[in-house]
Image: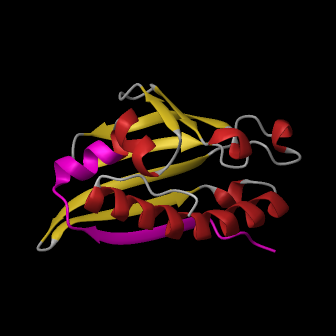
Amino acid sequence: MTVKDTIEREVVFKATRSELWAALTTAEGLAGWWCDGAEIDLRPGGRLTLDFGPEHGINHATVVAVEPESRFVTNWRPFQDEPGAEEIPDLTTQIEFRLEDHMHGTLLRVRESGFAALPAALGTKTIGENEYGWDMVLTWLRHYLNTGEKARWA
């Protein structure tokens, strides 16, 4: 069975590029919608640490590309706690955020890829979880941008 490789989402936010960029690329912004706490070294090769709390743990990512207010790319291991993950220490998925002007605010294109390179069972499980996950966290991002309030695990 072939594992689908990529998840893609497009969402328009009633926010400026600067506001959306800050939510995606600052520790305060990321902690406002995606995780409990974050640290980020916003440069290619820099580290991004996302603390998802006691239930989901800490995830480390590597910053791949930064084009201010336009494009942000990271590699991460969303499956790091799954059985067998220790056997594939160099495999990651890549998340790309692209921001574009839109008549109603800013269009965000999210693309996560690399699932097909994972062992089949792990790739199938991870892409399924992440497809649902992106739909959920992008609603949290909308809430955060619209209200300034954190909305997680609701």
Q: On the rendered structure, is 125 left or right of 101?
A: right
Residue sitting nearer the eye, 50 or 120: 50
Quarter of the image with the N terminus in it: bottom right
Q: Is residue 48 magenta?
A: no
Percent position (x, y) of residue 31? 44, 41
- Does residue 115 appear to the left or right of 26 in the view shown? right
Residue extent of the magenta highlight:
1-23
Residue 86's x, y, as percent? 83, 36
Left or right: where does residue 144 sit relative to residue 84?
A: left
Identify the residue shown where x is 27% and y is 43%.
22
Determine whether 68 is above or below 127 in the image. Answer: above
Q: Is residue 20 magenta?
A: yes
In the displayed structure, would residue 54 be above or below residue 130?
Answer: above
Q: How many marks?
A: 0
Render colour scheme: secondary structure
Tell me which residue sits at (56%, 64%) in the image.
Answer: 154
Q: Nearer the viewer, residue 141 or 74?
A: 141
**With respect to residue 59, does 150 lie above or below?**
below
**Spot occupied by residue 27 in the image (x, y as percentages of width and height):** 40, 34
**Image-based side of 112 in relation to 5, left or right:** left
Q: Which of the two residues, 140 or 80, is positioned nearer the viewer here?
A: 140
- The quarter of the picture where residue 145 lies is bottom left
In this view, the residue farthest toward the left is: 103
- Residue pictured at 66% horizontal, 70% vertical: 4
Residue 123 picture location, percent across and down: 74, 60
| Quarter occupied by residue 87 | top right
